[in-house]
Image (cartoon, rainbow, N blue to C red):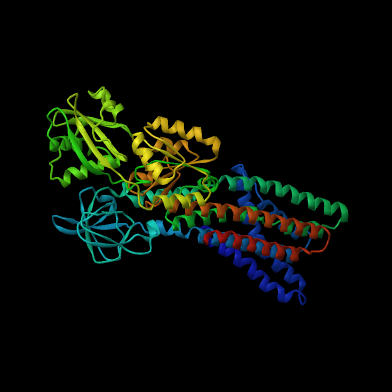
């Protein structure tokens, strides 16, 4: 029997026993007592089994109080109180399951979106295959209402529902050649898709891995709640002991134990944090764990890369400046051929420009890339290197830093060497997003006190962007190792959030208190270095996730404080003889219901 069905049976059994015994309470009290005892025993047996399993794992919690309350009630002949406690405990467990499922709804919906089969267009026509069989280059037919199985690009016009991925309610129109992410729904007519990644490497698979990791995680606050729960167990037993010493009335001891069963600590914190994770997922931000959600609520310093976060990440070629007799087209062709091996946005911009110019690109060999600095390799037997001045200085252009060609505010220069000699420069631009300044303002309003631009680009480029957006500090021409050092230097200012593309910024993402990858495409969605992924390239979604995290954390703490406070007052009232065991059980159930409903407020905006 699965856990959910067992919860239902344990809820129904004491309810049936109470329904049978209550009408007989005055006419046949012995029969009623037997019915109440029989209603309690299965719940107590399952509870004792769970406690034994927990003790073998080195875990002990407030289930001990529930078992103790039922056992003491049966021992004192208070079978009605025992049955009520059994019903309240089973009802609380069922309510907790419901609350957790309700809180996980958005994340579970993402898991349910994964298609199992796809229609592949092959030599023999259309064939249904498992999505694991799809490979880059395959053509796939996506029918109306189906979910896109793999990342690729549209081979014709398409209307896509991306709400499950990005939170955007309005369908998006894609033209032939536009990128299409797996997990998007086809809201229009059937269209053909050219696969660019396998199912396991696609966006939806990466998102599902994040969701599964988030569901399996336990936040530090939840683990702290477990330790608080043990303290509460001690307080409960202390009050019960005091009640016995002052009154010698075992019914008062029983009433105290009943009021302490179960505890808002073990209900409120996980429900509120799971609700926060689910609410963030609905807003287009997948947070990997409750620990990351807690840290997101506390961050004070934002460090971010420029390319793809503050800018579109789609660089445009402005000028080709050859040297040493190299033809402009040949310079671009050699550089773009080598850059086919890189996933950097600048590399992709060069490749796109070369293809737009109709240049035939060759397959590079023996490629070595220094993330954020440059790339070197062989193109048609010629040694080609391109990147910043420091990188090409080691590949045949020792005085590259003195080159002044193509310098302009906000422009990015890529220096190129061929066969160990300077070959020219490529001038590109990646201007800030029009909405970037307004989006950074929303991040500040969400609690960020300091914003640092951390870039591998030239100082002139990075400072031009920083000045236009009102960024506090600009750190340019930083290698991946220097980015890590910069992150560590900022930590005394408060918890640090690093926002990057999840690929070139992986070391800095891992070094920060919380690393967030911008965009869900391919590797960014599954980057182990990132603690969260913004599924759509919008910084304001990060601000919304921060507000959600703060609200979820605040609601968890509020639920714990109010629930514990009410429980302690109830125990004191029971110790004073003002509550019977049955009244205490009803009071505690009311407290638990109120605490869980309050924790579920984290689902709302």
Choose top left, top right, bottom left or bottom right for residue 29: bottom right
Q: From the top left corner, tell me how far across and down residue 552 is, in percent.
A: 56, 54
Up/down of 334 relative to 401, above or below:
below
Q: Is residue 434 left or right of residue 70?
A: left
From the viewer's side, name the closer residue of 115 and 538. Answer: 538
From the viewer's side, name the closer residue of 158 and 139. Answer: 158
Choose top left, top right, bottom left or bottom right for residue 340: top left
Residue 367 seen in the figure: no
The number of callouts visible is 0
Residue at 68% in and 57% down: 562
Residue at 39% in and 45% down: 468
Choose top left, top right, bottom left or bottom right for residue 268: bottom right
Residue at 72% in and 67% down: 34
Q: Is residue 499 left or right of residue 64?
A: left
Q: From the top left corner, tell me how far across and down residue 360 is, in percent.
A: 12, 41
Q: Is residue 308 left or right of residue 385?
A: right
Residue 289 seen in the figure: yes
Q: From the top left corner, tell me how far across and down residue 347 is, in percent.
A: 26, 39
From the viewer's side, name the closer residue of 422 and 262. Answer: 422
Q: From the top left corner, tell me how far across and down residue 381 is, in percent.
A: 14, 28
Up/down of 391 relative to 535, above or below:
above
Residue at 38% in and 59% down: 164
Up/down of 459 relative to 253, above or below:
above
């Amino acid at each position: 029997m699965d856990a959910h069905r067992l919860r239902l049976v344990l809820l129904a059994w004491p309810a049936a026993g109470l329904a049978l015994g209550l009408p007989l309470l005055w006419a046949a009290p012995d029969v009623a007592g037997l019915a109440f005892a029989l209603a309690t025993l299965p719940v107590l047996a399952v509870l004792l089994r769970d406690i034994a399993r927990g003790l073998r794992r080195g875990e002990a919690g407030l289930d001990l109080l529930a078992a103790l309350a039922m056992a003491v009630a049966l021992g004192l002949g208070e079978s009605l109180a025992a049955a009520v406690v059994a019903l309240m405990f089973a009802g609380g467990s069922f309510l907790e399951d419901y609350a957790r499922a309700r809180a996980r709804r958005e994340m579970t919906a993402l898991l349910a979106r994964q298609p199992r089969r796809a229609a592949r267009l092959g030599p023999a026509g259309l064939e249904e295959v498992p999505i694991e069989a799809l490979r880059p280059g395959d053509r796939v037919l996506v029918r109306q209402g189906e979910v896109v199985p793999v990342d690729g690009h549209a081979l014709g016009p398409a209307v896509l529902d991306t709400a499950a991925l990005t939170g955007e309610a309005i369908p998006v129109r894609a033209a032939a050649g536009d990128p299409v992410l797996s997990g998007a729904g086809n809201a229009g007519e059937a269209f053909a898709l050219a696969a660019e990644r396998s199912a396991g490497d696609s966006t939806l698979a990466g998102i599902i891995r994040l969701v599964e990791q988030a569901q399996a995680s336990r936040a530090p606050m939840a683990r702290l709640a477990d330790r608080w729960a043990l303290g509460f167990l001690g307080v409960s037993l202390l009050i019960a002991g005091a009640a016995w010493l002052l009154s010698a009335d075992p019914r008062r001891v029983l009433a105290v134990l009943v009021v302490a069963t179960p505890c808002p600590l073990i209900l409120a914190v996980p429900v509120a944090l799971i609700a926060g994770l689910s609410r963030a997922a609905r807003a287009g931000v997948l947070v990997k764990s409750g620990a990351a959600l807690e840290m997101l609520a506390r961050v004070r310093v934002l460090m971010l890369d420029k390319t793809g976060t503050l800018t579109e990440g789609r660089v445009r070629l402005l000028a080709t400046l050859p040297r040493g007799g190299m033809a402009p087209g040949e310079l671009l062709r050699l550089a773009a051929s080598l850059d086919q091996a890189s996933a950097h946005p600048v590399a992709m911009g060069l490749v796109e420009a070369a293809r737009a110019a109709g240049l035939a690109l060759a397959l590079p060999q023996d490629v070595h890339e220094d993330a954020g600095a440059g790339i070197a390799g062989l193109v048609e037997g010629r040694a080609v290197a391109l990147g910043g001045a420091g990188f090409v200085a080691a590949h045949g252009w020792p005085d590259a830093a003195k080159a002044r060609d193509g310098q302009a505010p906000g422009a990015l220069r890529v220096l190129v060497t061929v066969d160990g000699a300077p070959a020219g420069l490529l001038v590109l631009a990646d201007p800030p997003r029009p909405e970037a300044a307004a989006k950074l303002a929303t991040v500040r309003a969400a609690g960020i006190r300091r914003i640092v631009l951390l870039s591998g680009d030239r100082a002139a480029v990075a400072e031009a962007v920083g000045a236009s957006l009102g960024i506090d500090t600009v750190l340019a021409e930083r290698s991946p190792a220097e980015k890590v050092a910069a992150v560590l230097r900022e930590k005394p200012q408060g918890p640090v959030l690093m926002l990057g593309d999840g690929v070139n910024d992986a070391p800095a993402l891992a070094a920060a208190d919380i690393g967030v990858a911008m965009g869900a495409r391919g590797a960014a969605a599954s980057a182990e270095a990132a603690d969260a992924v913004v599924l759509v390239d919008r910084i304001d979604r990060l601000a919304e996730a921060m507000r959600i995290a703060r609200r979820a954390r605040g609601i968890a703490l509020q639920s714990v404080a109010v629930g514990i406070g009410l429980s302690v007052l109830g125990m004191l009232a029971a110790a004073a003889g003002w509550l019977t065991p049955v009244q205490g059980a009803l009071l505690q159930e009311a407290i638990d219901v109120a605490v869980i409903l309050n924790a579920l407020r984290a689902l709302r905006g």
